[in-house]
Amino acid sequence: MGEYSKALEYYEKDLEITKKALPPTHPDLAGSYLCFAACYEKMGDYTAALKALKNANKIQEKTFQENNQVFGLTFS
């Protein structure tokens, strides 16, 4: 438990594959950034977590209507 650095390595590999396979506004790409944010938050790197959340949010803003519940979940 708590192997967040190792998790980040796998999320990085996932992100590379996802970026190649999906369009840049696909919700799954936002999901990848949310995984990064969760890891960084657990590691106490709040600056990196916020950056990842903002990346996810940019994608979500292009994909979903502004009243979609996904926005509340992203920043909860």
Image (tube, rainbow, N blue to C red):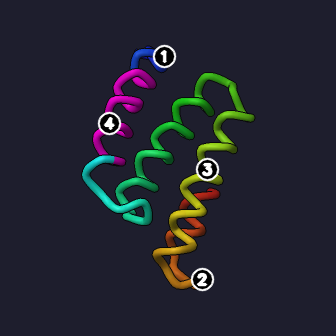
Which quadrant would residue 24 be assigned to in this image? bottom left
- Between the residue at mark 1 and the residue at mark 4, the CA separation in whole angstroms equals 14 Å
**In the displayed structure image, the side of residue 20 where residue 5 appears, left or right:** right
**In the displayed structure image, the side of residue 20 where residue 1 appears, left or right:** right
Numbered label attached to residue 75: none
Q: Which residue is mark 3?
A: 53
**Could you tell me the amino acid type at mark 2?**
Glu
In this rendered view, identify the residue nearer to me: 21 or 68: 21
> SS at mark 3?
helix
Q: Nearer the viewer, mark 4 or mark 3?
A: 4
**Could you tell me the amino acid type at mark 4?**
Asp
Q: Position of residue 72 (x, y in %)?
A: 59, 68
Q: Which residue is mark 4?
A: 14
Which residues, given as a range, are shown in magenta?
7-19
Q: How many marks?
A: 4
**In the displayed structure image, the side of residue 44 where residue 73 appears, left or right:** left
Q: Which residue is mark 1?
A: 5
Q: Is residue 23 magenta?
A: no
Q: Which residue is mark 2?
A: 66
Disc 1 to disc 3: CB gap under 8 Å: no
- Between the residue at mark 4 and the residue at mark 3, the CA separation in whole angstroms equals 17 Å
Q: Position of residue 36 (x, y in %)?
A: 50, 37
